Image (spheres, coloured by chain):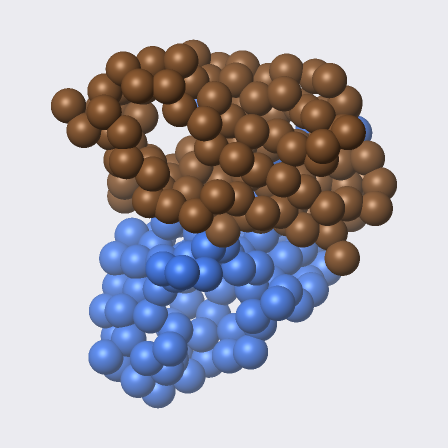
Chain colours: A brown, B blue
């Protein structure tokens, strides 16, 4: 079945380090891909998305490229800040229904 | 601005009591979803609705029910609360237009404790 796999956390980095959070997917069709972020005590909010192969989503210094050949959508940021500490969720959607299929989430901790 | 709200934000109840969590959205979205979030389990879908009078079970629907009498609201009811239902509950909504790509908008969550 369709699924999303994320790297397990927590991921702990120092401020200004380079960030990669891996996300791979399995899907029978051509999904749209999302990264959501959840700050402590809050709901999830969309960070970025890509709707077709080779699209790059970007927001707040974060980027992710939809790689159909490797079925991946890895999240990257060149220089993280303490304020980026949060849980990050990768998700996919298919045209067949309105639901999102979620990864397990990756907790990111940035130390000053 | 359009938004999605949940109430209460925190709730403590006793085992066996009926509890209703409210979700209200002003996006005018047809789709609404209820999730629970537990450590080690990520987000799990409880119930969802694609429009007024439409409700469907998700992967963890036992012990929960929903009803959809209008576009804006999807209340979640725990018929007889159990300690296993202690969790953080999130409501979300989404559009049905193709340009939305099924992006979901989330409420702030309700933290429920069942003693």
In percent of the image, x 36 and y 60: which residue is there? B39
- Residue B72 is at least partly visible in this image: no
**Lateral position of residue A9 relative to residue B100, left or right:** left
In the displayed structure, A6 sits above or below A71; it is below
In the displayed structure, B56 sits above or below A99; it is below
The residue nearer to you, when weighing A34 against A28, is A28
Question: How far across and down, in percent of the image, does residue B93 sit?
Answer: 58, 42
- Residue A17 is at least partly visible in this image: yes
In percent of the image, x 40 and y 13: which residue is there? A78
The single residue placed furthest to the left in the displayed view is A112
How many marks can you see? 0
In percent of the image, x 35 and y 87: which residue is there? B16
The residue nearer to you, when weighing A57 against A95, is A57
Question: How far across and down, in percent of the image, does residue B57 sit?
Answer: 66, 68
In the displayed structure, B43 sits above or below A60; it is below
The single residue placed furthest to the bottom in the displayed view is B16
Q: Looking at the rendering, in which quadrant would you find the C terminus of chain B?
A: bottom left
Question: How far across and down, in percent of the image, does residue B87 sit?
Answer: 35, 64
Q: Quadrant of residue B46?
A: bottom right
The residue nearer to you, when weighing B68 against B82, is B82
Question: How far across and down, in percent of the image, does residue B65 sit?
Answer: 56, 71
In percent of the image, x 49 and y 51: which residue is there? A104
The residue nearer to you, when weighing A77 against B70, is A77
**Lateral position of residue B36 relative to residue A65, left or right:** left
Q: Quadrant of residue B86?
A: bottom left
């Amino acid at each position: 079945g369709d699924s999303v796999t994320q790297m397990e956390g927590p991921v702990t980095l120092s401020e200004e380090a380079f960030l990669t959070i891996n996300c791979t997917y399995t899907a029978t069709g051509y999904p749209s891909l999302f990264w959501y972020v959840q700050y402590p005590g809050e709901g999830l909010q969309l960070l970025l998305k890509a709707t077709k192969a080779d699209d790059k989503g970007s927001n707040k210094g974060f980027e992710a490229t939809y790689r159909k050949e490797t079925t991946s959508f890895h999240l990257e940021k060149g220089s993280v800040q303490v304020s980026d500490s949060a849980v990050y969720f990768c998700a996919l959607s298919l045209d067949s229904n309105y639901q999102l299929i979620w990864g397990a989430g990756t907790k990111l901790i940035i130390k000053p | 601005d359009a938004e999605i709200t949940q109430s209460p934000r925190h709730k403590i109840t006793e085992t066996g009591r009926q509890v209703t969590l409210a979700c209200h959205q002003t996006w005018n979205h047809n789709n609404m979803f209820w999730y629970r979030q537990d450590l080690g389990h990520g987000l799990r879908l409880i119930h969802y609705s694609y429009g007024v009078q439409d409700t469907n079970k998700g992967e963890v629907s036992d012990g929960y029910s929903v009803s959809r009498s209008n576009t804006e609201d999807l209340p979640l009811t725990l018929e007889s609360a159990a300690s296993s239902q202690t969790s953080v509950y999130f409501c979300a909504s989404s559009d049905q237009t193709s340009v939305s790509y099924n992006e979901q908008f989330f409420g702030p969550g309700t933290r429920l404790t069942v003693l």
